[in-house]
Image: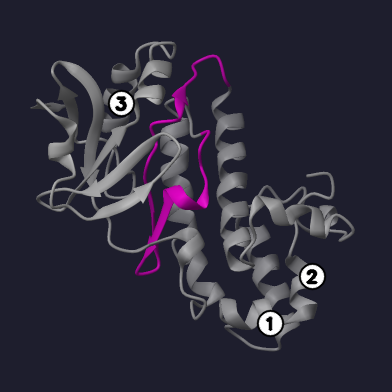
């Protein structure tokens, strides 16, 4: 990967539009359709205990493609690593997509996205941070960003890594359909949802069953997110996940 050396990190955000502020980093629009992510000092200090962090970023970069958006350039301030840049992907993070989005459209690219998840887990990559904020949806396609909190774990089973990551990906799609946040989960503790998808492994059969339930509950062939959220029966049918969550 190429490197960028700056004498003051404030140069990175001067005259640039902020994209987001997280617990560990700030993200700004950069040049040439890139996004610049630089970490707070406290988080940078914690990286000292995470082994070869730059080596991990390099591996992610090597596995990147049009759907896996990895680091492009490492950024250093006076020879100290402070962040990296990556390609800007037009679209909405999964928890911000339009409520006029059709439910069926959310699954057009599902198999392709799962294939990319498998490609990474076949290289022992544990996504760890696979949440809606790290998934971009644009033109009915998925893109995965901010993978730097994941890890390569060659002691893990590739199959286990894949199935866990695919399950998490599916959950995030569903949570986004219903506008759920982690704080909402207790509301649904009395809803019998364990029997709904457990055992299906979130594969094509599960998707077909899920879409059929939504269609029947809404009495519409291709309901939108807005329609599903307004439909009480649909909510009870598929606003799930574990009673014990």
| Res. 89 image quadrant | bottom left
Q: Are marks 1 and 3 in contact (CB under 8 Å)?
A: no
Residue depicted at x 75% and y 54%:
185
Residue depicted at x 36% and y 45%:
145
Disc 1 vs disc 2: which is toward the camera?
1
- Residue at mark 2: 237
| Res. 236 image quadrant | bottom right
The boundaries of the magenta stretch are: 128-156
Q: Is residue 227 at all visible to an observer of this figure? A: yes
- Residue at mark 1: 230
Could you tell me which secondary element the residue under label 3 belongs to? helix
Relative to residue 216, is residue 157 drawn left or right?
A: left
> Mark on residue 57?
3
Residue depicted at x 48% and y 72%:
105
| Res. 103 image quadrant | bottom right
Relative to residue 21, is residue 86 drawn left or right?
A: left
Relative to residue 130, is residue 86 drawn left or right?
A: left
Residue 219 vertical placement versus 143 (above, below): below
Image location of residue 19, percent across then percent down = 30, 53
Image location of residue 235, percent across then percent down = 75, 72
- Work out whether mark 1 precedes mark 3 in sequence or the reverse, and give the earlier one: 3
């Amino acid at each position: 990967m190429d490197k960028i050396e700056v004498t003051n990190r404030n140069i990175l955000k001067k005259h640039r539009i902020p994209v987001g502020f997280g617990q560990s980093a700030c993200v700004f629009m950069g040049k040439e359709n890139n996004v610049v992510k630089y970490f707070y000092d406290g988080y940078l200090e914690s990286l000292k205990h995470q082994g070869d962090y730059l080596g991990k970023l390099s591996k992610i970069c090597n596995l990147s493609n049009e759907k896996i958006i990895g680091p492009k350039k490492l950024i250093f301030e006076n020879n100290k690593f402070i962040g990296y840049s990556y390609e800007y992907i037009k679209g909405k993070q999964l928890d911000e997509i339009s409520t006029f989005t059709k439910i069926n459209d959310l699954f057009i690219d599902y198999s392709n996205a799962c294939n990319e998840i498998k490609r990474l887990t076949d290289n022992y990559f544990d996504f760890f941070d696979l949440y809606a904020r790290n998934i971009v949806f644009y033109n009915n396609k998925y893109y995965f960003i901010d993978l730097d909190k994941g890890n390569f774990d060659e002691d893990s089973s590739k199959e286990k890594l894949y199935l866990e990551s695919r399950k998490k990906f599916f959950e995030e799609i569903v949570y986004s359909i219903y506008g759920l946040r982690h704080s909402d989960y207790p509301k649904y503790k009395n809803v019998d949802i364990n029997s709904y998808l457990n055992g299906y492994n979130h594969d094509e059969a599960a998707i077909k069953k899920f879409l059929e339930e939504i269609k029947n509950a809404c009495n519409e062939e291709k309901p939108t997110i807005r329609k599903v959220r307004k439909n009480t029966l649909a909510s009870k049918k598929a606003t799930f996940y574990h009673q014990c969550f």
